[in-house]
Image (cartoon, rainbow, N blue to C red):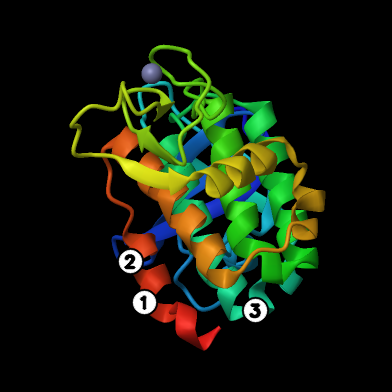
Amino acid sequence: MIPTAARGWVLGTTNYAEADKIAQLYTLQLGRVKAMVKGIRKPKSKLASSIDLFTESSFSLFKKSTASLYVLGQAKVLNDNSALKNDFQVITCLQVLSETVTQATPEGEPHPEIYELLKETLVALEKEPRSSELLLTAFVLKLMEDLGYPLELENCAECGETIVAQRVYLIPHRGGALCESCHGSTAAKFQVNKMALEILKKLRRTPAERVHVLKLQPVLSRQIFMTVMGYLERTLEKPFRSLEYYAKVLPLETR
Ligand SMILES: [Zn+2]
């Protein structure tokens, strides 16, 4: 069997059988795929360091045409992103990031632009850990665009009118921001004020390396982060477990 070479990150693992794990990978060449990592839970496994969360490695993957899983043959660490793993807030953000990519990206579909976006986001997280919440918010806004369901923020997603009201409703499954007359009585909506809307627009067009220039009050940063994450959750109809954990371990008043 000829292996497929792919570079990428491990997004998470689950234990399998006695000594194995199934790893969720995000790769440049194959997109998101699952791979069996045999013997990884044995003390001297050579693959251990390469299956750390968000360690970038080059993987050698095998798959029989009938199998649904790849098997990880070899892995070589390219960048362990160790600086990312020293900061508790960043580590918690990485968990949200890994769940976001796992839930939002289709399996087995390469998206080089998403790979690049992830890479830029990880580099920026390493340099500017204090901006992690905004970096993640910007990542999700750009990810939705790359996946083909951008969040409409400029004009009303239904009637196309410019949004002038002080309050704007972001409504999942209806394209994003809706004006006062279109939003109706939908229960599933996220309200943002004009200022938050402007910040979201700005975040989407700011490259990850420049996001830290934007300085926001923690309360506002948290609000827009939770709004965008909530919008994505509703769009995908999949609850994110990491968000509840995030809010619990990083309460606003102690930051
Ligand atoms: Zn409208």
- Picture coordinates of residue 232 (x, y %)? 40, 40
What residue is disc 3 on? 87
The extreme top residue here reads 159
Q: Nearer the viewer, mark 3 or mark 2?
A: 2
The local secondary structure at tag 3 comes to loop
**How far is the residue under mark 3 from the one under mark 2?**
19 Å
Q: Is residue 18 above or below residue 177?
A: below
The amino acid sitting under disc 3 is Asp
Label 1–label 2 contact, CB within 8 A: yes
Position of 28 with respect to 153 (left or right) is right
What residue is disc 1 on? 248
- Residue 37 is at least partly visible in this image: no
**How far is the residue under mark 1 from the one under mark 3?**
17 Å
Residue occupying image coordinates x 58% and y 65%: 52
Q: Nearer the viewer, residue 88 or 150?
A: 150
The amino acid sitting under disc 1 is Lys
Mark drawn on residue 156: none
The amino acid sitting under disc 2 is Glu
- Picture coordinates of residue 43 (x, y %)? 51, 78
Q: Is residue 128 above or below residue 206?
A: below
What residue is disc 2 on? 244
Residue occupying image coordinates x 72% and y 35%: 205
- Picture coordinates of residue 23 (x, y %)? 46, 52
Residue occupying image coordinates x 69% and y 41%: 202
**How far is the residue under mark 1 from the one under mark 2?**
6 Å
Displayed quadrant of residue 67:
top left
Q: Nearer the viewer, mark 1 or mark 3?
A: 1
**Mark 2 crowd level (few <14, some 14–19, many ≥20, 10 Å Cα):** few
**Mark 3 crowd level (few <14, some 14–19, many ≥20, 10 Å Cα):** few
Q: Is residue 47 above or below residue 228?
A: below
Displayed quadrant of residue 20:
bottom left
For disc 3, does the CB lie below 8 Å from ligand 1?
no
